[in-house]
Amino acid sequence: MTLRALRSKIMLQTTKYSNDFIKLGIDEKTISALNYLKFSIPTPIQKEVIPLALNGKNVIGIAQTGTGKTLAFGIPMIENVIRNKGQGLILVPTRELAIQVGNAIREVGKLWNLHCSIIIGGVSQKRQILSLKNNPDIIIATPGRLADLINQGKYKLNKINVLTLDEADRMLDEGFLPEITKILEGVTSKHQMMLFSATMPKAISKLVNRFMNDPKTIEITPQGTTPDKLDHEAFIIPKSNKLQ
């Protein structure tokens, strides 16, 4: 299917589904993509964050994994980056999450001709450097690899106008605080910042106080809340396979 045919197919979905995302002030192009993906009812975190973020507010979202955080920050980032002709940056703790977030952003941003770059460790830098030279709209990166490319002079942060830290507490657990701090120090242009975390340890509070101006805090579930859905599995193994 050609890109033009795909866009036409996506746009047709707008008339087929009732979509509560419209009430959040989202652009028609994004609504059409959400309809195509069968997303019609925003989650609580999306309801609270999207209107604030679309208006350029700095946002702190305290919520567990699986609450819809990616679209909560992804939709406003897409629209604000495109409209203001800047560049978005999403920092995540793991390669797997970077790929997952990147796929979601691409799907929702289909009608915006969105160009995304995924910058992660464990793969060749050459393609990533080339991708960054092509001026992507949104970069999804792990802090270690991005900091490495910045140190090499392969990427500059001067175009960033929307920045998101996703699963900030996990990034600190992985030991990325020095890289995150250096990246935040390098974003010198006027920008919007969003931070999402399941908990708010002191180190994150210090980052917020230093780098976020008048953030609006949205707490969907109290810190430390156990997720509603938790699967337990037991494995029976021979005694000979157990560690002594």
Image (cartoon, helix red, strand yellow):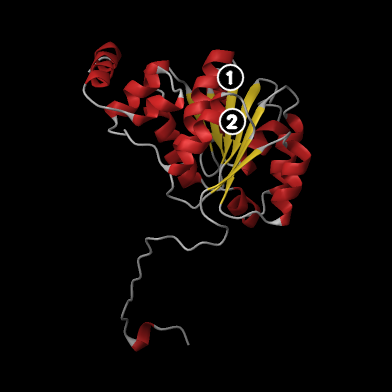
Q: Which amino acid does label 1 sit on?
A: Lys
Which corner quadrant of the image does residue 211 belong to? top right
Q: What element carries label 1?
A: helix
Residue at the disc numbered 2? 89
In front of the other: 2 or 150 = 2
Residue at 37% over, 21% down = 110
Residue at 47% over, 45% down = 97
Nearer the viewer's eye, disc 2 or disc 1? 2
Cα separation, mark 2 vs mark 1, equals: 15 Å
In front of the other: 84 or 2 = 84
Residue 6 percent location from the top left of the image: 26, 17
Mark 1 surroundings within 10 Å by alpha-carbon count, few (fewer than 14), some (14 through 19), many (20 or more) = few
Q: Which mark is residue 133?
A: 1
Left or right: residue 85 compared with residue 179:
left
Residue at 59% over, 30% down = 89
Residue at 67% over, 54% down = 175
Residue 35 percent location from the top left of the image: 29, 27
In front of the other: 224 or 127 = 224
